[in-house]
Image (spheres, helix red, strand yellow):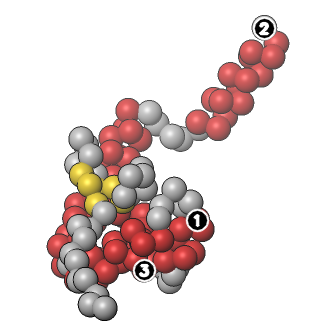
Amino acid sequence: MTLAIVTEPTPLKLNDDGVVLVGKTRVTLDTVVAAFLEGATAEEIVEQYPSLQLADVYSVIGYYLRQKTEVDAYLKIRQERAAQVRQENERRFNPIGIRDRLIARLDHQRQG
C-alpha cells in the first residue's frame, strides 16, 4: 500500500471586513493564535471554541509557525485598528461616569 501525500489548503478565509476566520466558523485567526501563544493546546482551543475542528486548529497553528512574520504583522495591524476603534468610541461615547448614568436611567424607568 502506498500512502497518498496530498496538500490541503489551510482552513483560513478572509471575510468582507478583512478579518481572517478559521474554517467555516466566525472564530478569528487572532483568537486561535492568542490562545496558542498563551499555552493552550489545539485540543484546549477546540474545547473553548467548539465550532472549530481539531484538524483545522492544528493546521492553523502550523500555518502560524511557518508564516510567523506575516501573521504577526497582520495581528499587529488588527491590534492597531482595534485601538483606533476603541479610542474613537471613547471619544464619541465618553465612558467616564457611564455606570452612574446607567443606574440613574434604570432608577428613572423604575419610578416612571
Placement of the C terminus among the 4 image quadrants: top right
- Up/down of 65 relative to 91, above or below: below
- Seen as rendered, the residue at the extreme top is 112
Question: What is the three-letter code of the residue carrying label 1?
Answer: Gln
Separation of marks 2 and 1 at Cα, in angstroms: 43 Å
Badge 3 is on which residue?
A: 37
Report whether 78 appears left or right of 38.
Answer: left
Q: Nearer the viewer, residue 28 or 79?
A: 28
Specify the quadrant of the image occupied by residue 17: top left
Give the mark nearer the N terminus: 2 vs 1: 1
Badge 1 is on which residue?
A: 48
Question: What is the three-letter code of the residue carrying label 2?
Answer: Gly
- Up/down of 98 relative to 60, above or below: above
Mark 2 or 1: the one toward you: 1
Q: Residue at x 41, y 50 (%)?
A: 26
In the rendered image, residue 95, in percent from the top left (x then y), is placed at: 51, 40
Q: Secondary structure at mark 2?
A: loop
